[in-house]
Image: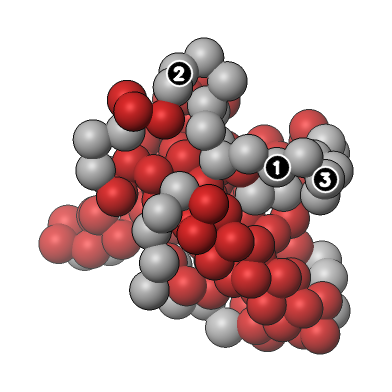
C-alpha cells in the first residue's frame, strides 16, 4: 500500500522507494502517537502522502506541459499488460502539480480546502489543477486506446 501511494505521487520507482522508506522511518519514529491499531493502514497512508508532498515540495521541479507521453522512455507500449499499468503510467506523465491534486482529490478523498491548506495554494487553483489534470488524463488515455 505504501509503495502504491508513493508511486502515484512520485511517478518513478526510485523516487517512490525513497518516499516509502522515509514514510516507514517517520511511522516508526511516531509509533507512540498511534492510538488505534486498527487505524494503522490509514495512519500510514497519511504519513506516506505527507512524505511524498514534502519530497515534491523540496524538489520544486515541475514538468512542462508540452510533449507529455505516458509511455516510459525505456519500454515499448506493448509491455503494458493491463489498463491499470497504462493508467499509472499516464498518471506518472502528468505534471507534478496536476498529479498531486488529482491524487489528493480523486484517490485520497481530500476536499479542495484541505488540498489548498496542504499545498499552500488557493481552493480555486486546486479546482483548476484538478480540471486540467482530468482533461490531460483523458487525452493521455485516449492516446493509449483506453477511453471511458
Judged left or right of residue 108, residue 59 is right
Q: Secondary structure at mark 2?
A: loop
Q: Are marks 3 and 2 in contact (CB under 8 Å)?
A: no
Q: Position of residue 146 (x, y in %)?
A: 38, 58
In this rendering, does residue 117 appear at all?
A: no
* First in sequence: mark 3 vs mark 2: 3
Looking at the image, which residue sits at the far top?
Answer: 74
For label 2, count other residues whose C-alpha is less than 10 Å away and answer few (under 14), some (14-19) or many (20+): few
What number is the disc on residue 68?
1
For label 3, count other residues whose C-alpha is less than 10 Å away and answer few (under 14), some (14-19) or many (20+): few
Q: Which image quarter: residue 147?
A: bottom left
Q: Secondary structure at mark 1?
A: loop
Q: Which image quarter: residue 15?
A: top right
Residue sitting at x 82%, y 45%:
66
Between marks 3 and 2, how big is the CA–CA gap? 21 Å
Q: Position of residue 42 (x, y in %)?
A: 31, 61
Indicate the quadrant containing the C terminus: top left, top right, bottom left or bottom right. bottom left
Q: Position of residue 51 (x, y in %)?
A: 57, 42
Q: Are marks 1 and 3 in contact (CB under 8 Å)?
A: yes
Q: Secondary structure at mark 3?
A: loop
What number is the disc on residue 75?
2
Residue sitting at x 31%, y 33%:
80
Q: Which residue is mark 3?
A: 66
Between marks 2 and 1, how big is the CA–CA gap? 16 Å
In this rendering, does residue 94 appear at all?
A: yes
Above or below, 46 against 5 in this view is: below
* First in sequence: mark 2 vs mark 1: 1
Amino acid at each position: 500500500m505504501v509503495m502504491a501511494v508513493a508511486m502515484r505521487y512520485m511517478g518513478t520507482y526510485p523516487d517512490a522507494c525513497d518516499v516509502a522508506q522515509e514514510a516507514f522511518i517517520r511511522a516508526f519514529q511516531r509509533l507512540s502517537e498511534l492510538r488505534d491499531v486498527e487505524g494503522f493502514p490509514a495512519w500510514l497512508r497519511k504519513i506516506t502522502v505527507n512524505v511524498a508532498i514534502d519530497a515534491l515540495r523540496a524538489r520544486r521541479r515541475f514538468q512542462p506541459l508540452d510533449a507529455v507521453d505516458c509511455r516510459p522512455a525505456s519500454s515499448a507500449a506493448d509491455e503494458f499488460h493491463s489498463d491499470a499499468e497504462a493508467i499509472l503510467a499516464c498518471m506518472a506523465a502528468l505534471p507534478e502539480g496536476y498529479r498531486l491534486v488529482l491524487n489528493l482529490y480523486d484517490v485520497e478523498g481530500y476536499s479542495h480546502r484541505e488540498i489548498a491548506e496542504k499545498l499552500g495554494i488557493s481552493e480555486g487553483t486546486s479546482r483548476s489543477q484538478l480540471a486540467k489534470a482530468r482533461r490531460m488524463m483523458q487525452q493521455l488515455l485516449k492516446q493509449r486506446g483506453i477511453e471511458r
